[in-house]
Amino acid sequence: MGGAFARILAFPSMVNLPDQAWKKALYCGILCAAIGLLSGGATAGSGYEITRKFLESPSIDQWPVFFGIEKFFTTVLSYLSGMAGGIFSPSLSIGAGLGFTVAKLFHFSNFKVCALLGMVAFFSGAIQAPLTGVIIMEMTDEHILIIPFLLAAYLARRIGKVFMPVPLYRFLANKNRKG
């Protein structure tokens, strides 16, 4: 999903949005607000707080199953609206959300590891910087997971290249230089 995320951000014409900036912002804002209402506000902001809350939680029972997908769409819409926003932190949140969802659907007991692997994989698939994705190890002090993190990062990077052959940040930098 990280590669698809990067592809959509790189080629906004894939999403049929109005050409006028104010209409695009209005349309994206309404959709983000609707998703935000449906998610009980969970998709607002960078996603850092909700991700931290569930990583510190003793149980996955309260985890909203669709958070990763909802955050994916609100991040894409926020970016495509032309408003200021980031990719790094929301990517980690999306990845954690997808990892939590996999853990919940398949009844994995170590849901935190699934979330951390999701963070690494989504970020590496989207940004195609696997060693940067493994920074999650330092952020979480989970050094024991270095091998699974590296495997997830490199596998996700490889799959991400199928969707987006050029790393997203490089693509965007070249696009901005050209004009």
Image: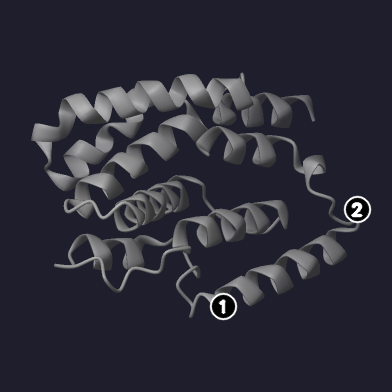
Q: Residue drawn 74% across and 36% down?
A: 11
Q: Name the residue under label 2.
A: 19
Q: Which amino acid does label 1 sit on?
A: Leu
Note whether 144 is above or below 157 in the view shown.
below
Residue 120 location (% of width, % of height): 34, 37
Q: What residue type is labelled 2?
A: Asp
Q: Residue drawn 51% across and 59% down?
A: 71
Question: Circle 2: is it few (<14), some (14-19), or many (20+) Cα within 10 Å?
Answer: few
Element type at marker 1? helix
Query: On the image, which quarter does residue 137 sit in?
Result: top left
Quadrant location, the C terminus: top right
Note whether 4 is above or below 89 in the view shown.
above
Q: For residue 53, which numbered disc appears in the image?
A: none
Q: As drawn, which residue projects farthest toward the left?
A: 144
Q: For residue 38, which numbered disc appears in the image?
A: 1
Dots 2, 1 in contact, CB < 8 A: no
Q: Is 132 situated left or right of 26 in this image?
A: left
- In depth, the one of 59 and 175 nearer the eye is 59
Residue 174 location (% of width, % of height): 68, 24
- Count of residue discs: 2
Element type at marker 2? loop
Could you tell me if residue 57 is visible in this image?
Answer: yes
- Dot placed on the residue nearer the N-terminal end, 2 or 1: 2
Note whether 5 is above or below 33 in the view shown.
above
- In depth, the one of 30 and 162 nearer the eye is 162
Q: Is 82 situated left or right of 45 in this image?
A: right
